Image: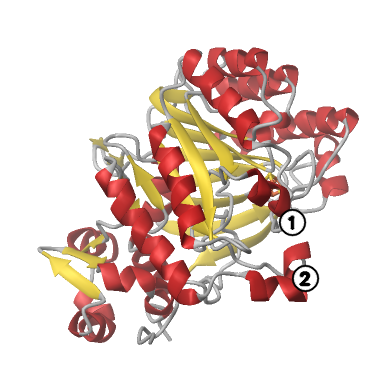
Amino acid sequence: MRTDPDPIRTEPFRYKAKGMNAGEGIMPYCLPQAKQRCRMKKETGNRKKREMEIYIHIPFCLRKCNYCDFLSFPSGKEVQDAYTLSLCHEIRQTEEYLFQGRERSEAGPREDLPVRSIFFGGGTPSLLSIYNMERIIRQLNSSFPAAKGAEISLEANPGTLTEEKLSAFRELGINRLSIGLQSTEDRCLKMLGRIHTFSEFLHNYRQARDLGFDNINLDIMSGLPDQSLSSYLETLRIVTELKPDHISSYSLILEEGTPFYRDEKLKARLPDEDTEREMYEKTGEILADSGYDRYEISNYAREGKECIHNLGYWEGVPYLGMGLGASSFWREEGKAMRFSNTTDLSSYLETPFKDFPVREDFCQLTRKEQMEEFMFLGMRKTRGVDGKEFEKRFGFRMEEIFGEVMDRYISMDLLAREESRLFLTRRGINVSNRIFSDFLLD
Ligand code: SF4
């Protein structure tokens, strides 16, 4: 009998603030794949040295999957060309807006704000033509050149990749691929509405390896209709044999507005909560035995292959999101703010003809909201949050603000402390949504 207060498949915890890309506060199906460290440490004169990240949203997919509520849709070549033009314009405008009056070095990142990661998420960024991808990357190189050794990720779906594309993406500087596999069973792929078969995925995966991609994430899903524990474990077994560098395993959530949500009969075909919990626990065990470290609730990596970009989301590194519906988090002069772009494609396509019109939903975070975010985003990581960092950032001890809720969950063995770190226990991970929501201050 279940005794935990909050099963894994309960409503995902959704933070009230607008302006987060998927992957920050919730568990999406297909992380805009959107992973190490906020390094606001070195001082340059009186100024703190810091880093930033860039998220580029490509909203196009060949076909909509049955479970997907991301901002994505099918489109023709003309729309993709126009979108690329708007996106390049937005990147240019953002540069002008942000760096007005600041010194710009000849080449390479601005001294005080190096770009540590760029993430092309979607949608299906790998659907873009080589020509359009090249235009976007050229513009980024000019406006926001990535720092040496930066992680440059691209979400890719089998069925949209060719050897020519993979090779061109690599030459353009993409050094990490995040491939949406979801399942090794064609039956499941078909039911999910995916455009590919397992053998098509395998072909692309081997091509990518042969071309030298040495940092590849595979997305897989659990909790699918008619999926038994053994069939999920078989997917996991096959995936580990392929030795990807990183694995993201997400549990299916029925999102409003999707065909899956509308299908009343589907709910009866989902694995029960105990089975789903076992899937989650076995995932951790099997991946640990295969050399993957769980560094976040749903993310597992070989040593040194954690996703720098996503870690930045959870550690409060400022990022700029560009493209339709993309969200940003920015700090300037002691203030923290979130904002996002319009989700209306027609408005977005007018971007080159308007003056900075695409941003909306500006929201300046209060001190209290920043503290909340520090806690519930940071605790997604298995190493949790650092009390010293909290004190440095906010001028209060973590216990002064969250002492009551910390003590309560520590006594229930759902949170634990190790020196200055506070983190979810194994049991706590299973009920993380409940715990996170208790870190919202009244
Ligand atoms: S490929 Fe990803 S973004 Fe596109 S429809 Fe499917 S789940 Fe959504």
Q: Given the image, on which type of amino acid does mark 1 rest?
A: Asn
Q: Nearer the viewer, residue 262 or 296?
A: 262
Q: Which residue is mark 1?
A: 66
* Location of residue 130 in the rendering, given as x and y in whole percent from the top left corner: 70, 18
Identify the mark at residue 263; answer none if there is no mark.
2
Residue shown at 40% from the left, 82% from the top: 441
Against 17, is 77 above or below?
A: above
Q: Residue at x 60, y 18 (%)?
A: 166
Looking at numbered disc 2 in the image, what kind of residue is underneath it? Asp
Q: Is residue 116 above or below residue 401?
A: above
Residue 360 at x, y percent in the picture: 70, 57
Task: Name the quadrant of the N terminus.
Answer: bottom left
Where residue 428 appears, as percent x and y from the top left, is: 30, 73
Spot occupied by residue 406 in the image (x, y as percentages of width and height): 24, 79
In contact (CB < 8 Å): disc 2 and disc 1 = no
SS state under label 2:
loop
Q: Nearer the viewer, residue 213 or 55?
A: 213
Describe the element under mark 1 as helix, strand or loop: loop
Q: Is residue 202 visible?
A: yes
| Front-lying residue, 251 or 356 | 251
Instruction: Compare marks 2 and 1 and give the one earlier in the sequence.
Output: 1
